[in-house]
Image (cartoon, grey):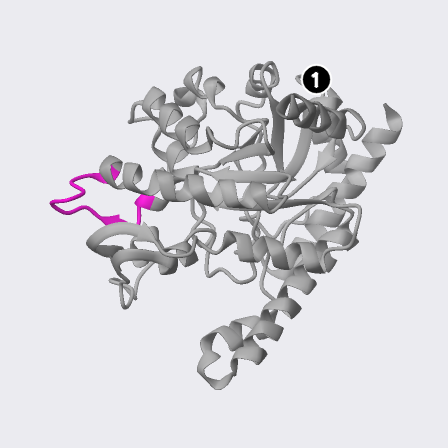
Amino acid sequence: MRQADEKANLFVIMKNNPIRTSVIGSYPFPSWLHFAGENLNQFGANDISEIKDDATTCAIQDQVNAGLDVITDGEQTRLDFNLSFYGHLKGIAMEPESPRKFGPPAHDQRGKHEIIGELSDENGLGAVEEFKRLKRLAPPGKTLKMSVPGPFTMSGRLIPNDRYPDRFAITEALLPIISKELEDLVSEGCEEICVDEPSMSCYGYKEDTDRFVDIFNRTVNSVHGKTRLCTHLCFGNFKGHAVGFRSYKPLFPSFMNLNVDEMHLEMANREYSELEIISEVAEKMDVAVGIIDVKSYFIEPVELLESKIRDCLKFVDAEKLVLAPDCGLSQTARWAAKLKLQNMCNAAQIVRESL
């Protein structure tokens, strides 16, 4: 009965707020946080706690000022949308430095971590602490969302060995760890969680998509129906560069079986190619359309965004449409992120009022 009530409440949220505005998870660091992060040894424990609070407050305030319906902590205490999670894992040796420091920017500059024992975690992956901070600092009236990387995406930075011979073996070892993190977030009262699996969309063109769906659904099984579940399916972003084959066609129809309430698709950077696919998605779940290009410093005018929203409404009802950036905003300059989000929210409001 409780699950039915919770699902009904999630439906009411969208019904009462058509063309919902949201974000994926990350937000640009304030400039001083970059300096602080590179000089943490000069700060005491209380100083660092204050730094985390202040940075999170900046991210929250920027999102509130933009007019977003759904906000996050901006992932201000993470190095990357998933990189900081490795620091909570036991059984790995963190890669000391980038394997390639010169030449054009690409994902290989990140390198990988060696597995030296059984993969486990001691006290979770840190997302619960982040959510507690967000709850404490956020103003009332906003939906609070957390983003957690899925096990297949997180497995990509770990090197297989005799114990874990391939990426899928590593994924299976990470799956219960991430599931427990989701359970702990729900227990703490988190009402919206994005399980971020961009590696699935990047490599779905050459992998078994049904296997991906099985992995995802087993990851979220224990929290399905207890919170609003989202997933973010983009094609990667490393300093403005995509990683995967940028088409959703290889992922469907398999990905229609993902157990989520909302599926996010990258559209703006892809010139809205395959926009019609949102009609199919909306038959089973809400659809979040990326209408802000996080890889470009072109500030989308309100008029352009209004037009794109109306294009989306040709394929999906307003009650099932969510608007968001294509991806997390951590690699976009803060000044640009502010303007882009403000214009997105203003355009959404104009279209709402015209319905």
Q: Which of 302 and 265 lies nearest the eye of the viewer? A: 265
* Left/right of residue 312 with respect to residue 169 in the rendered view: right
Query: How many numbered discs sit on the rendered protein?
Result: 1
Measured as percent of width and height from the top left, residue 6 is found at 67, 28
Q: Which of 115 and 233 lies nearest the eye of the viewer? A: 115
Q: Residue furthest right?
A: 353
| Residue 159 belongs to the span the image colors magenta | yes
* Left/right of residue 68 with respect to residue 269 in the rendered view: right
Q: Secondary structure at mark 1?
A: loop
Q: Residue 202, can we see it?
A: yes
Identify which residue is drawn at 36% across, 29% down: 215
The amino acid at mark 1 is Lys
Measured as percent of width and height from the top left, residue 286 is found at 63, 24
Q: What residue does disc 1 label?
A: 314
Q: Magenta part of the protein: which range?
A: 155-167
Measured as percent of width and height from the top left, residue 307 is found at 74, 30
* Left/right of residue 213 with respect to residue 341 in the rendered view: left
Q: Which of 214 and 297 lies nearest the eye of the viewer? A: 214
Q: Main secondary structure of the magenta part?
A: loop
Q: Quadrant of the N terminus?
A: top right
Measured as percent of width and height from the top left, residue 5 is found at 69, 24
Identify which residue is drawn at 41% across, 43% down: 178
Identify which residue is drawn at 35% across, 23% down: 209
